Image (spheres, helix red, strand yellow):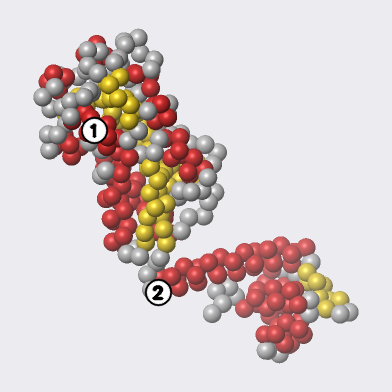
C-alpha cells in the first residue's frame, strides 16, 4: 500500500518513463487517469511541474525539486515497511557495545537485560579494553555505543550523558588504609601498588598519580584487566587506585575496601556515554542507549 499520495507516485513514474502513456501502461491504468493526477498536482502546487515534448515529458526545475522529495519519501517508506515487517516476528539484530570493564560488572548488564525484555531476539557484541581502543571502536564503526571513563565528544562522536565519580584506593578489608576516612598520597607511599599496564594507564586519569607523582611508589605488578587487579589486591599483594564503579559488590561482600582520596589529590573521573554523530541507528539501539543512560543517571544520583 502506498504511503504517499497517488499523484506523487504517478508523477515519479511518468518522469522515470519519460511518458505519461508508458507510465499508464506499466501501472495498468488509463493514460487519462495519470494525466488527471498530474494536472491536479500542478494545480495544488501552483506551478508547472513538467514540460510536454513531442515524444514525452520532462520535469521543470520545480518538478525536479518535487521528485527529490518524492524519492526520499519512497526510500523512507521502504525502510519503514522493513522495520514493521521485522516487528511481525520480533525484531532481530545486534547491539555492539564498547565499554570499560568496570561498567560491564553491574551497570551494563542491567541495561542489556531490560532491552532483551522488550526485544527478546536482540543479541549483543561486547568490546572491552582501554579507553583508546574503546573509543576507536566507535570511530571505526565497530560499536554502536560506548561507555567508558574520561572520553570527550568529537566531530564524529557526541556525549549522551556523563557524570563524575571520585577516585579512591582499594585494599583488603583489614588493611590500615581501610580504617581511614580519606587517603593522601603519603598514606599510600609505604605500600606496594597494583598498577594498570602502560596502555591502560596512558588513557586513564590515574596516570598522574603513578607516573607523575612526586611521591615514589613501589609497583608490585602491572595488569591489563580490572578483574586481575582486584584479585591481586584481595590476595594482599598491594593496593590500587580506582573509582568505586564496578567494585560495589566486592565492598558489600567485604572482599575489598574502598577509601576515597582526600580533596585535591586527584580530580574525579568522568563516566561518559557516547554515540556516533550522523549515523542512522536502528530503533532498538536507540532504546538501548536510553536504557543505559537511565542506569547511569541512577548511579549518578
Disc tally is 2
- Name the residue nearer the viewer: 246 or 198: 198
- Name the residue nearer the viewer: 89 or 65: 89
Q: Which residue lies furthest to the right in this view?
A: 54
Q: In which quadrant of the rendered view does residue 239 lie? A: top left
Q: Is residue 256 left or right of residue 214?
A: left
Q: In which quadrant of the rendered view does residue 163 lie? A: top left
The answer to whether residue 300 is visible is: no
- Relative to 79, say whether 153 is above or below: above
Provide the residue designation for mark 1.
Answer: 230
Residue 187 image offset from top left, x and y in percent: 21, 13
Q: What element carries label 1?
A: helix
Quadrant of the rendering where the N terminus is positioned: bottom right
- Name the residue nearer the viewer: 257 or 74: 257
Residue 228 image offset from top left, x and y in percent: 27, 34
Q: Is mark 2 on a helix, strand or loop?
A: helix
User: What residue is rendered at 41% in x and 58% in y?
Assistant: 94
Label 2 to label 1: alpha-carbon separation? 46 Å
Provide the residue designation for mark 2.
Answer: 88
Residue 80 image offset from top left, x and y in percent: 50, 68
- Name the residue nearer the viewer: 61 or 86: 86
Amino acid at each position: 500500500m502506498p504511503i504517499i499520495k497517488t499523484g506523487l507516485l504517478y508523477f515519479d513514474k511518468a518522469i522515470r518513463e519519460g511518458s505519461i502513456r508508458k507510465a499508464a501502461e506499466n501501472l495498468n491504468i488509463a493514460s487519462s487517469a495519470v494525466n488527471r493526477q498530474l494536472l491536479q498536482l500542478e494545480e495544488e502546487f501552483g506551478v508547472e511541474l513538467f514540460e510536454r515534448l513531442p515524444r514525452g515529458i520532462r520535469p521543470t526545475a520545480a518538478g525536479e525539486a518535487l521528485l527529490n522529495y518524492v524519492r526520499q519519501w519512497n526510500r523512507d517508506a521502504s525502510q519503514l515497511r522493513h522495520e514493521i515487517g521485522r516487528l511481525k516476528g520480533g525484531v532481530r539484530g545486534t547491539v555492539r557495545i564498547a565499554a570499560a570493564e568496570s561498567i560491564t560488572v553491574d551497570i551494563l548488564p542491567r541495561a542489556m537485560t531490560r532491552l532483551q525484555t522488550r526485544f527478546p531476539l536482540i543479541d549483543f557484541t561486547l568490546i572491552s579494553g582501554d579507553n583508546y581502543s574503546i573509543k576507536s571502536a566507535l570511530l571505526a564503526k565497530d560499536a554502536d555505543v560506548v561507555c567508558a571513563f574520561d572520553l570527550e565528544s568529537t566531530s564524529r562522536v557526541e556525549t549522551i550523558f556523563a557524570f563524575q565519580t571520585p577516585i579512591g584506593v582499594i585494599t583488603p578489608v583489614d588493611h590500615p588504609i581501610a580504617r581511614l576516612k580519606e587517603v593522601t598520597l603519603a598514606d599510600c607511599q609505604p605500600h606496594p601498588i597494583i598498577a594498570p599496564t602502560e596502555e591502560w594507564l596512558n588513557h586513564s586519569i590515574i596516570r598522574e598519580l603513578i607516573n607523575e607523582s612526586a611521591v615514589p611508589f613501589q609497583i608490585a605488578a602491572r595488569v591489563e584487566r580490572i578483574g586481575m587487579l582486584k584479585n591481586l589486591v584481595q590476595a594482599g599483594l598491594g593496593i590500587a587506585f580506582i573509582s568505586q564503579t564496578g567494585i560495589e559488590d566486592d565492598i558489600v561482600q567485604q572482599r575489598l575496601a574502598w577509601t576515597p582520596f582526600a580533596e585535591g589529590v586527584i580530580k574525579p573521573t568522568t563516566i561518559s556515554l557516547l554515540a556516533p554523530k550522523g549515523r542512522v541507528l536502528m530503533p532498538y539501539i536507540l532504546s538501548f542507549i536510553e536504557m543505559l543512560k537511565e542506569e547511569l543517571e541512577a548511579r549518578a544520583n
